[in-house]
Every structure is written in structure tokens, then in C-alpha cells.
Image (cartoon, rainbow, N blue to C red):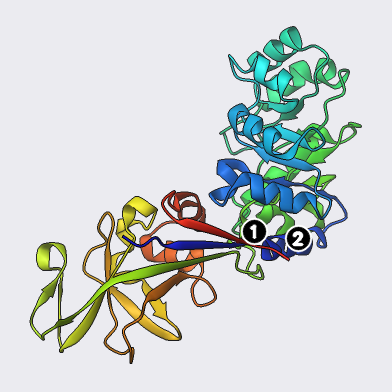
Amino acid sequence: MATATLTIDLDALISNWRALDALTEAQTAAVVKADGYGLGADRVARALMRVGVNRFFVAVAEEGAALRQAVGPKPEINVFGGHMAGDTDMISDMMLTPMLNSVNQIVRHFEALPNHPFGVQLDTGMNRLGLEEAEWAAVAQTVLTRSPTLVMSHLACADEPEHPMNPQQLATFKRLTDGISVPRSLAATGGILLGSGYHFDLTRPGVGLYGGMPFVEAAPVTGLSIPVVQVREVAAGESVGYSNTWIAERDSRVATISAGYADGLIRAMGSNVSVFADEIRCPVIGRVSMDLITVDVTDVEQDPKSVELLGLHQSVDTVAEAAGTIGYEILTSLGARYYRRYKSA
């Protein structure tokens, strides 16, 4: 069966980083967790290093170790998940900088790697990761004497600029950290767009680099071209796909394309989404199955050899909305079976 092609435009990704960097006076890092949001952390990070990015964030130490092998010894690699049990050798050997999230992690790190760099994450209201206010008050003096590389927190509602949680978290972060001499970070992509009050010393854009919301001005980074396996004539009244969920209202031409939910094209998107044959919108019909999707190409003059799902005509967020999810999930679900083509100047 023919293979779909996922095109990743590294020049567009660099353009997005530069645009977000230009919005602040802070240092701009890059988040490349989940294998660079599904697009290849090694290729993404090396492209960003060419334009001066020297600080990356990953979710867990294993991701950091793989990234270190790809980018060499120079960049700083920060681990959001902190110093987990069993991570000590990896953190040390791979020169990773954990963001310590709890008193237990602080004790583990100080005992096992007393001279190794670390940062600290504070919980300012998201209740997910980080030291709570009382915990920080108890350990702050001891922690700060060891010169952490960063004190950070994470916004829960930055994608909603008017949400009252944003100024609430900002006020909490300032109350916990004003007056310290350590660099501070609060803003990911959404936080950058909230304005300079949220920027502090370092920003950590993630999804905006990859063309996702809430960065509406982002250049598209991903393109997905899916080959057509077969085109058939379907008479009015005939059905297509599992459970007869689509019945032709006119004599139609139906193309079967070579991708499905095993490739990250979420089944729930169903007929809410379309593909494109050149400039012609072709609706998905029937159910998304594991390896195949059927689309109505009746209005296309000639049988297409391939169709576009992601690209200039349709963003990851449009596909995500059709599936009732978010662009992050679409990006990180894009399947391993795709042939990946990287574009770069």
C-alpha cells in the first residue's frame, strides 16, 4: 500500500520561533517534548540551534537523553518532570537540568547530585506540578542559596486571554518570586501573547512553534499528503464504509485513501472534516477506519492520485476541531507509518 507523506517545514518553524521571540525582551527557549510535538525533536532542535536557540524543554529525562544525543553537549536541556526516582544517572550522564517539583525531588537531587544544575517549578494554581506556596516558603531560602538556573510556573488558561485565572496566577507567581535573583519563567506560547507582564526572563514557546493555536499568525509547519488507493463509481442509494453510515444522494465517485486512525487521524473527526484535491474540497464520507478513509471526489474533474489533509488549505486546529480535540493531540498523534520529508533552506 502506498505511504502518506508528512512534510515538515523547518523554515516555517524557525519563522514562528523568530516571531514569538520578537514579541519579548526575554530569552526565548523552545519546548520539544513528545518528540518535538510529533515532528521529530532531533530535527526540530537542530534547526532551531542554527538560529541561536540554546535552551530546550522536554517532559521526562528519557526524552532529554535522546535529545542530548541528537544535539550534542552545548544546549541546556530542561526536564519539566524533574528528578524522578531512577533518573539520577541519566540526569548526570546526559547533563540534564531537572525542574524540581516537590520537596522529595529537592531532597533526592541535593543528596544524589549536590553540585548538578537544577531549576524549580512552583504551583501557582494549576494544581498539576510544582511546589505549593507553603512548601516553597519552607525551602526557598535553602534552595536559592544553591543558585537554581530557573524558577518557573505554568499558566492554566493562557489560551483564553480574558480568563481571570491568568492575572490570578501572575499575581501569585510575583508574590512568590519577587526579589529573588534567579531567572524566572511563566509564559509558554499563550503567555507570550498575553503581553510583557507575563514574560519575565525566559519564555518557553511550544505549540506555537509548530503552527498551532493560540498563535493565529503562525506559519503552517505540517503538510500531510495521502495517496489514493482506488476510485470507484457509487450509484445513488448505495452505501460506503462500515455500518452503511454514508449513502450516496447522487451518482458519485469515491476515493479510498491510504491512512486512518492507526496513523493518528482520529476516528471521531469522521465526516466533519474534508481533504483537498488541488483546490477542490472533498468531504470525508463514511467512517474513518484503521488504515483507510473514503472521500467524495465527485466534483474533481480527474481522479486524484493523492489528497491533502494538512497544509495551506487546512490547519491542525481545523482537523482537531472536527475531531472534538485540540491541535496538540493531532500533532502528537501523527503516525509512524508516514514518510517524513523535511523542508529547509
Q: Residue furthest bottom?
A: 301
| Vertical position of residue 171 compared to residue 190: above or below | above
Quadrant location of the C terminus in the rendered image: bottom right
| Vertical position of residue 191 compared to residue 318: above or below | above
Quarter of the image for residue 100 reads top right
Q: Nearer the viewer, residue 21 or 129?
A: 21
Q: Residue at x 64, y 14 (%)?
A: 104
Mark 2 Cα within 10 Å, few/some/many (few <14, many 20+)? Answer: many
Amino acid beneath label 2: Leu
Q: Where's residue 292, x and y in %?
A: 27, 62
| Residue at numbered disc 1 | 208
| Residue at numbered disc 2 | 20
Q: From this viewpoint, is residue 292 visible?
A: yes
Q: Residue at x 79, y 38 (%)?
A: 75
Amino acid beneath label 1: Gly
Q: How many marks?
A: 2
Q: Give the secondary structure at mark 2.
A: helix
Residue 66 is marked as none
Q: Where's residue 262, x and y in %?
A: 33, 51
Q: Where's residue 199, x and y in %?
A: 80, 50
Q: Residue at x 33, y 88 (%)?
A: 300
Quadrant location of the N terminus in the rendered image: bottom left
Q: Give the secondary structure at mark 1.
A: helix
Q: Are marks 1 and 2 in contact (CB under 8 Å)?
A: yes
Structural distance between the alpha carbons of marks 1 and 2: 8 Å
Q: Residue at x 65, y 29 (%)?
A: 65
Mark 1 Cα within 10 Å, few/some/many (few <14, many 20+)? Answer: many
Q: Nearer the viewer, residue 281 or 81?
A: 281
